[in-house]
Image (cartoon, rainbow, N blue to C red):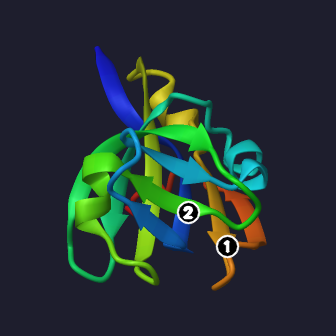
Amino acid sequence: MNVSMLKCKIHRATVTDADLNYEGSISIDPKLIKASGLFLNERVDIYNCNNGARFSTYVIEGKSGDICLNGAAARHVQKGDLVIICAYCGMDAKEAPKHKPTVVFVDSKNKIKEKRSFEVHKKKS
């Protein structure tokens, strides 16, 4: 059996722009792409902490500090909104308990504060 697991996320990044007239995607600071383990053109889910919108798009490289939603995705955010950017991966259920997703925490300028790999928590008996 295969399961879908969190691969990585950028937690509470600040939207720097929303460009309705650009082809759809999310422009992300190259340092955040690398630190999180995202790939260019990888599908990501975006969760807007300000308005509750949840939608998918794909990653393109932006400039330093960039978190810009482009095209139709721009309708779901406003400059200054906080978003969570997540990518998922599929794996065998036997691998899943050992999987450690990468989480990148950023400050209000989208600079890396902390990077963690989380272990799966086991239930207490």
**Disc number at residue 67?**
2
Give the quadrant of the N terminus: top left
Q: Nearer the viewer, residue 109 or 44?
A: 109
Query: Picture coordinates of residue 103 (x, y %)?
Result: 61, 58
The residue at 50%/30% (across/down) is 42
Query: Picture coordinates of residue 104 (x, y %)?
Result: 66, 62
Looking at the image, can residue 84 be seen? yes
The residue at 67%/48% (across/down) is 36
**Disc number at residue 110?**
1
Pointer 2 or 1: first along the chain: 2
Q: Badges 2 and 1: C-beta atoms under 8 Å apart? A: yes
Looking at the image, can residue 119 be seen? no
Q: Is residue 52 above or below residue 68?
A: below
Tag 1 secondary structure: loop
Q: Dot 1, how many residues are within 10 Å of its Cα: few (below 14), some (14-19), or many (20+)?
A: many
Question: In this image, 117 relative to 74: left or right?
Answer: right
The residue at 20%/73% (across/down) is 52
Q: Nearer the viewer, residue 35 or 110?
A: 110
**Disc number at residue 82?**
none
Query: Picture coordinates of residue 9 (x, y %)?
Result: 53, 54
- Residue type at mark 1: give it: Asn
Query: Picture coordinates of residue 68 (x, y %)?
Result: 50, 60
Number of residue marks? 2
Residue 13 lies in quadrant: bottom right
- Residue type at mark 2: give it: Ile
Give the quadrant of the C terminus: bottom left
Tag 2 secondary structure: strand
Question: In this image, 97 relative to 39: left or right?
Answer: left
